[in-house]
Structure formats: structure tokens, C-alpha cells
Image (spheres, rainbow, N blue to C red):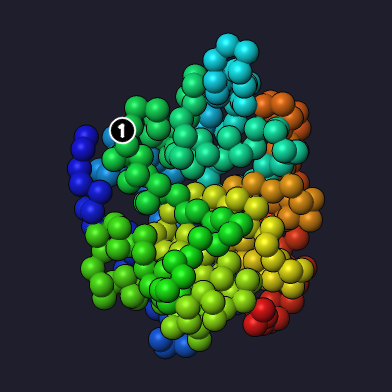
Amino acid sequence: MNEPLNEPLNEPLNGPTARPGDGAYSAGNGWTTAVPFDPPPADGPRDDVPGGEASGAEPVLLIRDVRKIYGEGEATVHALRGVSLTVERGDYVAIMGASGSGKSTLMNIIGCLDIPTTGTYLLGGTDVGVLDDVQLARVRNRRIGFIFQSFNLIPRMSALANVELPLAYGGVRAAERRRRALVALGLVGLADRVGHQPNELSGGQQQRVAVARALVTSPTLLLADEPTGALDSTSTRDVLAIFDRLSVSGRTIVVITHEDDVAAHAKRVIRLMDGQIVEDRRQAPVDEPPPLAGLRPPTEAVSDR
């Protein structure tokens, strides 16, 4: 199946009938709720990638005996050695490990930036291993929201334009792109910074723009690579509070981190060593709030940092 990548995205960020008081946020009208993050839309028939229909009962991630080998002969590196992992819809997972443990390789495979040497990876019921480059690009654009340590914002574009970018690649019309980007920026507390360029924003604000950009396509999975690594302690708390609220609203989140303080917010912690899972610890049930959610007063404003 080789449909053009610019086929329009049809799923609205907040649903077709979002109104004040039903859990949505409008930057233009100024109304919101205590937890202004809507859950992702239920998956139905997907015609953007092959693999049939996704069901709400299917796990978001299903990884079976995945191995990744680089090089040949004496230069062979076994980055992953038979990793198996299932992530259910609504879970919040922290993947940890020292340098060389394989966590970055696993992140690249989860994010469809690399493919396993052997093994199976299903994302929302779709076998990623059978997709061609165009289809993988479509999956990355529509089903995965990426958040990086270095923000990866376009320097000379406003916050609004940066958040609109995935929708532009997806073929969404300009007016709808703007509407959805304004909603996403409002969700992370930046409704008053939409016209600012990255160099006019603090590190914490830039990362919140990156979170908004990840949310704007209503992805199946939010995938964050060391999202607080470049932030001060105040901005770190702000970003983790946003992740907690997203988790409460039903988003599926996978965070790659080496920081115990970040992993403490997750419902589940997986630790890698030498390309294998050596610890898989649950800190909260999938269908309950993350362990540190609600410890911060809900009326506390997001900082300007």
C-alpha cells in the first residue's frame, strides 16, 4: 500500500464536538478545565498503513524477541539480545539503562527510526517490519509523537509554526493546522507565547512547545527521549507534571531516561543491561493515575521558565 504521505489527517485533536466543560481547552476562548488533556481517539479502521483494523483491546506496543546486530565478524555488536515487551494502551513506561545498555537502540526501533535484525514489532496492531520507507514515514508522522532532549525546534519559526509542522507534512489545511496547534500550545500553558521564536523562549518553554508538537496529531504513542535532560529543576517539574496529566487523561507514554526522579513518575519501569531486560517493575496499575500525579496542587500555574 503506497498512498501519498500528504493524505490529510482526519482525526481532530479534541474531537468534533469539543465544548467548554467537556475536558477540552480553547486558547482563543480562554476556557479550560482542571485537567485539559483529552484522551486519544479510539483506534478504528486505519487506511494510512497496512495491517487491518486496530482495536482498543490491542496493546500499543508488542515487541517479541527483538534482536539488533551491528557490524560483522570481530566488529559485531549485539545491541539488543531478544527483547520482548508489551505496552498496553494508557500505560506510562520509563525505560532506563546505562550507556551501552541498548535503550537508545530500543527507542529507535519503537520510534520506527530503525528496524530489528530479527524479531517482531507491532505498533497498534500494525507489523512495522513489513512497511516500506514511505509507510514508515507515515507511521512516524501520524502514530508517534516524538519529544527529544534537544527540543529540535526550527530556529526561525514561531512556536505556532513549529507545532503546525507535523500537520503540514500530513496534508492538513492551514486553518485546521492553526486551530489544532493553538489548542496544543494552550494545553502546555503557552497560549501567550504562540508568536515567539525558540531563541525568545526559555529551555522549559521550548520543551513545552516540543510536547505540544508531539500532541498535535493525536498520536497513538508519545515517545520521549531524555525529555528533561537539558532542563533546570523547575522546568523539569513542569514537564513531568504535564506528562502526569497526559497519563491521567489516557495517553500512552514511553520515556527513555537515566534519571530515577523522572522514572518515579512512570507507572512501570523497565531497566536494560547489555541489550536485555533485567528489571520490569510496576509502580501503578495501567488504569490508575501515575504514582506522583496529584501531589502538586492542581491550581499551581506552570512557570515562566
Q: Is residue 49 above or below residue 205?
A: above
Q: Residue at x 34, y 27 (%)?
A: 130
Q: Is residue 284 above or below residue 270?
A: below
Depth check: 277 or 161 in front? Answer: 161
Amino acid, disc 1: Asp
69 sits to left or right of 143: right
What percent of the width, then of the height, locates residue 263?
A: 74, 50
144 sits to left or right of 102: left
Q: Residue at x 62, y 13 (%)?
A: 74
What percent of the width, then of the height, locates residue 75?
A: 61, 18
28 sits to left or right of 271: left
Depth check: 37 or 182 in front? Answer: 182
Q: Is residue 254 above or below residue 305?
A: above
Disc 1, SS: loop
Q: Is residue 285 visible?
A: no
Q: Is residue 290 above or below residue 126?
A: below
What percent of the width, then of the height, locates residue 67?
A: 56, 22
94 sits to left or right of 218: right
Q: Which residue is mark 1?
A: 132
